[in-house]
Amino acid sequence: MAREYRVGIIGGGPAGCFCAYHLQQDCDVTIFEMSSPLKTLLVTGGGRCNLAHAEYDFRELTKFYPRGEKFLYSVFSKFATADTLEFFRSIGVETYTQEDNRIFPTSNSAADVREKFLASLKATIKQEKALRVNQLDDTLEVVTDEASYRFDAIVVAVGGHASYNIAKYLGHNIIAPKPALVGLKTDKLFPSGVVLKNVKTQIGKKVLQDDLLFTHNGISGPLAFKISSLNARENFPYSVTLDITGEIDLQKMFNANPHKTLKNLIGELVPKSFAAAICPSEEIKCSQVNSKTRDLVTKNLRELELKILSHSGAGEVVTCGGVDLKEINSKTMESKLVPNLYFCGEVLDIDGFCGGFNLQNCWSTAYIAAQAILDWHHNNV
Ligand SMILES: Cc1cc2nc3c(=O)[nH]c(=O)nc-3n(C[C@H](O)[C@H](O)[C@H](O)COP(=O)(O)OP(=O)(O)OC[C@H]3O[C@@H](n4cnc5c(N)ncnc54)[C@H](O)[C@@H]3O)c2cc1C
């Protein structure tokens, strides 16, 4: 009888564990996790775990990834949203879709997802830190802080927050890591806690529209996260222009409401505290507004320019950057430099918007790596 194919997985996060699950039936799998397996899942979705997004067309799904869009085309054609839900159902995690298309477990508990996922795993888990991978004649060797182990194939799933030493040591190019999906500090400040609905902005050719939250030191919320994501490689400071109301004719509104105060009228379009911040401080009636003030208020509503000074540190924080996709085969997730070495999850130079896309990247790339390892193994026994 042929001996079992040995696979070492470095990193027991969502990507590493998903890969292990799909290999465990046919291979001898060892996960090296320096902390605790699936610990990172606990904080996802504010503790509720936004595990996927209800976009079922794989071509459309790729469009939510500022980095990795083209690479994911082939990956998602084989494993995408419906497959993710099927997997979770199979381990006892039912899901529901929110109004904004984010998919959560019915339990609304990341801890519950983690528990069920861990219960389904049969792999050996070693709480050791992998230091490097050596290429030997016919195997790969993982050297940890405690010992060294030989494998037929190795999957690197160390995430985006770890060091990239293992990949670098094997000759891989690392695209410099930068934070994405973070809040941003701005030059102008507005009342903290105010939410503006459906604000539009344009970054390069991409027109974005989403809700914006003002914080004590800048902006946060879905639109700010998208801005931080698309501008992840931009140097600070940079400017963004916000269209808060869309097309608007203030003069026409003044003529129709001559006795209303300017602040009250603008307060019908946007939250009152924000209206007060963008109108002159003195109380004036609409009939008394001169053209200079009208144009200034219109500019604040249609073309509010903010200078982005730095990250604020708040937010979901995924890493833009990582292992260069040019060196990875998108059909197998195998390294083009080192045979039998695979990568999956956030360690790759792939990141998506907020909404379940980053976990979807983990599930899909991990599945592809597992299938490629199984195919190779079956063809060579
Ligand atoms: C606050 C927050 C909320 C989020 N919410 C969501 C969400 O709701 N939906 C969504 O889609 N995405 C979300 N994300 C992003 C998502 O969590 C990540 O994209 C995902 O966890 C990446 O998974 P991974 O397995 O690639 O890496 P990780 O989750 O980082 O796991 C890597 C694992 O490898 C281990 N490791 C690293 N180096 C070594 C080593 N040398 N030896 C041994 N072990 C090692 C680490 O301890 C870790 O457990 C969120 C992120 C954050 C920070």
Image (spheres, rainbow, N blue to C red):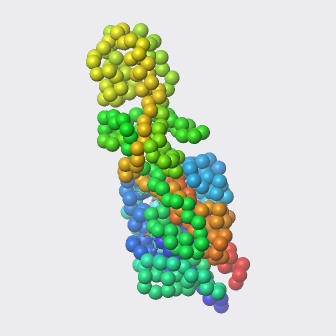
Q: Who's the residue at 62% across and 88% down the image?
A: 3
Measured along the vertical axis of the image, is residue 379 above or below residue 276?
A: below
Measured along the vertical axis of the image, is residue 146 above or below residue 225?
A: below
Quadrant including the C terminus: bottom right
Q: In the displayed image of the protein, which residue is found farthest to the bottom?
A: 1
Quarter holding residue 272: top left
Quarter holding residue 45: bottom left
Q: Nearer the viewer, residue 179 or 351?
A: 179
Q: Position of residue 344 (x, y in %)?
A: 56, 66
Q: Position of residue 242 (x, y in %)?
A: 47, 33
Ligand 1, by image quadrant, is bottom left
Quadrant including the N terminus: bottom right
Q: Who's the residue at 39% across and 62% down the image?
A: 42
Q: Is 83 on the left or on the right of 47, as rendered?
A: right
Q: Nearer the viewer, residue 246 or 238?
A: 238
Q: Nearer the viewer, residue 80 or 341?
A: 341
Q: Who's the residue at 49% across and 26% down the image?
A: 246
Measured along the vertical axis of the image, is residue 241 above or below residue 312?
A: above
Measured along the vertical axis of the image, is residue 194 above or below residue 45?
A: above
Q: Is 280 on the left or on the right of 18, as rendered?
A: left
Q: In the displayed image of the protein, which residue is found farthest to the right?
A: 379
Q: Is residue 16 visible?
A: no
Q: Position of residue 71 (x, y in %)?
A: 64, 57
Q: Is 21 on the left or on the right of 272, as rendered?
A: right
Q: Position of residue 231 (x, y in %)?
A: 51, 46
Q: Who's the residue at 36% across and 35% down the image?
A: 188
Q: Is residue 115 visible?
A: yes
Q: Is 125 on the left or on the right of 59, as rendered?
A: left
Quarter holding residue 4: bottom right
